[in-house]
Image (cartoon, helix red, strand yellow):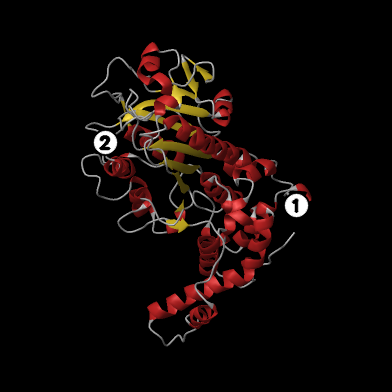
Amino acid sequence: MTTFEPQATLSRRRFLSLAAAGVAAGGAASMLGPVLWDQLARAGAAMGPPGALGSTSGRTLVLVTLYGGNDGLNTVVPYQDPSYLAARGILAVAPSTVLDLGDGFGLHPAMPQFHKLWTDKHLAIVQGVGFANPSYSHFESMDIWQTAQPQDPSGTGWLGRWMDKTGADPLRAVSIGPTVPTLLTGAKVQAAAIAPGPIKLPGSAADVALYRSLATTSDREPPLLVEAAHSNADLLEVNAVLGPVLDKSRANPLHLTGAEAPSTNGSAAALAIANGGGGPSAANVLSTQLSVVANLLLADVPSEVFSVELGGFDTHTEQVTTQAALLPQVDTAVGAFLDAISSTKRGRETVVLVYTEFGRRVSANASAGTDHGWANVVFAAGQPVKGGFYGEPPNLTNLSEGNQIYNLDFRRVYATVLDQVIGVDATTFLGGKFSTVGFV
């Protein structure tokens, strides 16, 4: 197995920039595996343990955003309700295929890992979640969810305000992807962004030579130019040190097969599955993102919040086919992620929250799909979660404009997470007092 020995003089700043640049440029975490990341992490011990940067619970939150408005009625299916079967027609999930949850509900048949979490009492399903005066706009609805400010969703993110209030270290929260979502953007601080993928220096050989020249400067230069040069040097060092490891990892993702699997990780096979079986080139982009998170957690980095995402849920047409393709990705990614980290104390204190911007209209449309709706379900999963149903089940005979009416303000879900997972007073960050739901 390829090994990497960090330089003894690697400073905290240099470790952070190496780690961030390495993953941002090349998806190092998703490729290296926990052993190599642990070697890197030793140089960053000065960052302190998880929970030292603003959380008091010692727990970790992983947010999964499903963009497009996933249809909750065909995900958590009221398969014994005749109103559902009548409204959905050919789009209705066949009662004989659902994964039974009890109380007349069943999971979509493509979600066996979620069903196992339910059986193990580590999956909470919060029903009827939404907000007053709902919007049919993807952008406005998602802004409301991410800012937690329904009246004016143009401000900072609900966790961005937590970052502003509790410290200035952006490493406390990490977004896996090329950009930082609004929810992790504060007025003064925003999360770090890590994009998985191979390290690639820009342009031709001449361009690379020019880039290398930018990595050298004199301390007599202006401070911003010196800092830029240091960042460029960090990326070049990452390329030189981690590049060969990444190349080997692309052929053997995560180094988690056979004798190369670390003896302390009893979920090596699950983590390999979580990486799609083939690294970042695999189709399941959510699994790739959660594989990065898994490696960071296995390395015990001090980040307390992670954000991942999957799009494509705007099912105006061909909903059955689309959900049959996307829901297995969510199921596999989340299930394998939780399995992969379950052997560690950090993993046993991790909570995954899955949400989307709105539900879908109860009745099917004429294009074998469903249009934008209102209330929906939210999932919480992980060992700290108290499994079961929360909120009121949908009443499909009492609709407004053909939509489910919300009965549980989404900020109550956030209040639960802030209080029980992050360990802070939610009132400060939600602009008011919201009772917790009790799923953690």
For the residues carrying marks 2 and 1, which lies nearer the camera in this image? 2
C-beta proximity under 8 Å, tags 2 and 1 = no
Label 2 vs label 1: CA separation?
Answer: 50 Å
Question: Where is residue 414, by image quadrant?
Answer: top left
Say whether disc 2 or disc 1 marks the residue closer to the N-terminus.
Answer: 2
Q: Nearer the viewer, residue 79 or 35?
A: 79
Q: Quadrant of residue 199?
A: bottom right
Mark 2 sits on what residue?
136
Q: Which residue is mark 1?
A: 260
At 52% across and 20% down in the image, what residue appears? 98
Where's residue 28, x and y in %? Answer: 58, 59
One can see residue 124 in this view? yes
Residue 362, position as x, y percentages in the image: 33, 23
**Quadrant of res 37:** bottom right
Mark 1 surroundings: few (<14), some (14-19) or many (≥20) residues within 10 A: few
Is 23 placed left or right of 395 in the picture? right
Residue 344 appears in the picture as rendered: no
Identify whether 181 is placed above or below 345.
below
| Residue type indicated by callout 1 | Glu
Q: Which sits in the foreground, 229 or 186?
A: 229
Image x and y of residue 129, in percent: 34, 29
Q: Give the farthest residue toward the right.
A: 259
Secondary structure under badge 2?
A: loop
In this image, 106 relative to 375: left or right?
right
